[in-house]
Amino acid sequence: MNPEDLVARLAPVRIPESFARFGLQDALAAIALGLVVALLLASLLRRVTVRRHRPADRARASIAELRAGDPRERIAGLARLLRAQGGTVPEGPSAALYDPRATIDATELERAVLDAARRR
């Protein structure tokens, strides 16, 4: 007996008629599964394609914002940025932060902030 004859002698598969029909519930279930898969893919794609800002770019933007303000507030803000980046304020500007009569060169602090941001 060859395989074709054996398959021909097998009885047809018998399932209830309600299982064999494709109805409204089946269509709704397929749509729901499609929406779940689409949401999962969208969240995955969002995580993969989100724009990441480098710490140095954020530091430059913060420095630019500080330039528009009061010079004393600018120096304090630069020191705060430097500490947030994990750096320490150099000795000269550190002592001058507490002396209102002292003049501080902000470019040295800006350079220190950018160097600390690049190291991150």
Image (cartoon, helix red, strand yellow):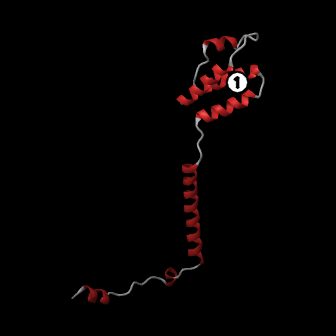
Which quadrant of the structure image shows residue 55?
top right
- The vertical placement of 119 against 15, above or below, is above
State the residue at coordinates (72%, 13%).
103
- The vertical placement of 46 against 84, above or below, is below
Is residue 54 found left or right of 14 in the rendered image?
right
> Mark 1 = which residue?
77
**Nearer to the camera, 40 or 110:** 110
Element class at badge 1: helix
Whole-percent x, y for residue 81 in the image: 65, 26
- The vertical placement of 49 against 69, above or below, is below
Crowding at mark 1 (Cα within 10 Å: few <14, some 14-19, many 20+): some
On the rendered image, what quadrant is the N terminus found in?
Answer: bottom left
State the residue at coordinates (60%, 27%).
114
Whole-percent x, y for residue 68 in the image: 76, 28
Is residue 113 found left or right of 15 in the rendered image?
right
Three-letter amino acid code of the residue under disc 1: Gly
Which quadrant of the structure image shows residue 108?
top right
State the residue at coordinates (60%, 72%).
28
On the rendered image, what quadrant is the C terminus found in?
Answer: top right
